Image (cartoon, rainbow, N blue to C red):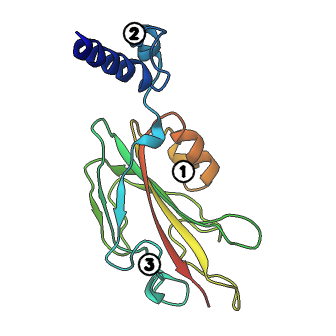
Amino acid sequence: MRRSLAIAAVALTAATGCGGGTGDASGAASPARTARTPAAPAARHLTVTSTAYPDGGTVPRRFTCDGADVSPPLAFSGVPAGTRSLAVTVRDLDAPGGTFTHWLIWDIDAGTRRLSAGAHPRGAVEGRNGFGRTGYGGPCPPHGDHPHHYVLTVYAADRRPPLSPAASAGASPDDLRRALSGHTLATGTLTGRYGR
């Protein structure tokens, strides 16, 4: 009898103590609350890699303003079901005037898992970077600065961003972020460093 009571007490403690606040006072899950709580977008993660440099590594000269100034080769994995398009941005978080955008590209086909160096995927659209040009502009920090951090972010979206073709070439990073807001299924980053 004592053993049965002890087992029942342990089972009751496990049922009520590990709920993380998701159940009602009895420890049972609340159907209404469960149904209303969407999965957090931050919980979905893409893996972004490059054969040119590891995460946290140095961006090779070829992919900077001191070299060929072409975008690095990329690979993505973990793209979730329901993805309709991919987008990529590259931002310098250490720029003297605040975050500086080096690349924004969207409407990349959802089935894409690799981009070669200097790629311009068919059907994709590139916006205006911080240099005032359309397309990729590689890392180009001021001479003498500590190495800057360049964060390349890949977005998996559940729709094609509704940016009109006429406005696309002049689209800003904020325009793209607004277009992806509420429609991003997953993101992943690759950070590189570069100094001169």
Residue bearing the label numbered 1: 168
Mark earlier in primary sequence (2, 1): 2
The amino acid marked with disc number 3 is Val
92 sits left or right of 7 in the view: right
User: Marks 1 and 3: in contact by CB < 8 Å?
Assistant: no
Q: Position of residue 185 (x, y in %)?
A: 40, 39
Q: Which mark is residue 70?
A: 3
Which is more toward the observer, 114 or 49? 49
Q: Residue at x 44, y 78 (%)?
A: 70
Which is more toward the observer, 157 or 93? 93
CA–CA distance in space, label 3 to label 1: 21 Å
CA–CA distance in space, label 3 to label 2: 51 Å
Which part of the image, by quadrant, shows the N terminus?
top left
Q: Residue furthest front?
A: 2
Residue bearing the label numbered 2: 31
Which is more toward the observer, 139 or 31? 31
Compared to 188, does 34 lie above or below? above
Q: Position of residue 187 (x, y in %)?
A: 43, 50
Q: Which mark is residue 159?
A: none
